[in-house]
Image (cartoon, rainbow, N blue to C red):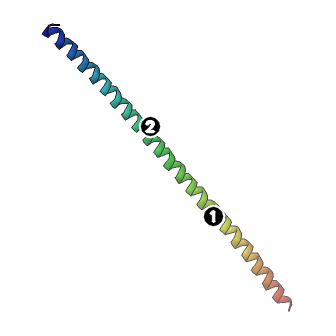
Amino acid sequence: MNFRNRLRVFLTSVNRSRNCINRLMNFRNRLRVFLTSVYRSRNCINRLMNILNRLREFVTSGYRLRNGMNRLRNFLNRLRFF
């Protein structure tokens, strides 16, 4: 093999390795974008779950408060009979 053929083989191998590196970088970037979107959706789901939990706590606390007020009213009504 003469020098020109060797140079051509070397340059094509460099070009192939550059293509391979570019494909790997593209894959890495796509994976990063996918993972950040998953992370954002997980954050959104966590925020929604927190809001739902707070709403449930608020409703149950209101229910307990209503029960407590009813018990207090019943207790005061019983005292009125004495």
Q: Residue at x 57, y 57 (%)?
A: 51
The residue tagged 1 is 57
Q: Is residue 26 above or below residue 55?
A: above
Q: Position of residue 73 (x, y in %)?
A: 77, 80
Q: Residue at x 81, y 89 (%)?
A: 79
Q: What amino acid type should be assigned to the residue bearing mark 2?
A: Phe
Q: Residue at x 59, y 61 (%)?
A: 54
In this rendered view, identify the residue nearer to me: 14 or 69.
Answer: 14
Q: Residues within 10 Å of mark 1 (few under 14, many from 20)?
A: few
Q: Residue at x 28, y 19 (%)?
A: 16
Residue 34 tag number: 2
Left/right placement of residue 48 relative to residue 73 reads left
Q: Is residue 21 above or below residue 64?
A: above
Residue 70 tag number: none
Left/right placement of residue 55 relative to residue 32 reads right
Q: SS at mark 1?
A: helix
Q: Position of residue 15 (x, y in %)?
A: 25, 19
Q: Where, quadrant-wise, is the C terminus in this rendering?
A: bottom right
Q: SS at mark 2?
A: helix
- What is the quadrant of residue 35 in the picture? top left
- What is the quadrant of residue 49 in the picture? bottom right
Q: Earlier in the sequence, mark 2 or mark 1?
A: 2
Q: Residues within 10 Å of mark 2 (few under 14, many from 20)?
A: few
Q: Is residue 58 above or below residue 39?
A: below
- What is the quadrant of residue 20 in the picture? top left
Q: Position of residue 26 (x, y in %)?
A: 35, 29
Q: What amino acid type should be assigned to the residue bearing mark 1?
A: Glu
Q: Position of residue 47 (x, y in %)?
A: 52, 53
In this rendered view, identify the residue nearer to me: 5 or 35.
Answer: 5
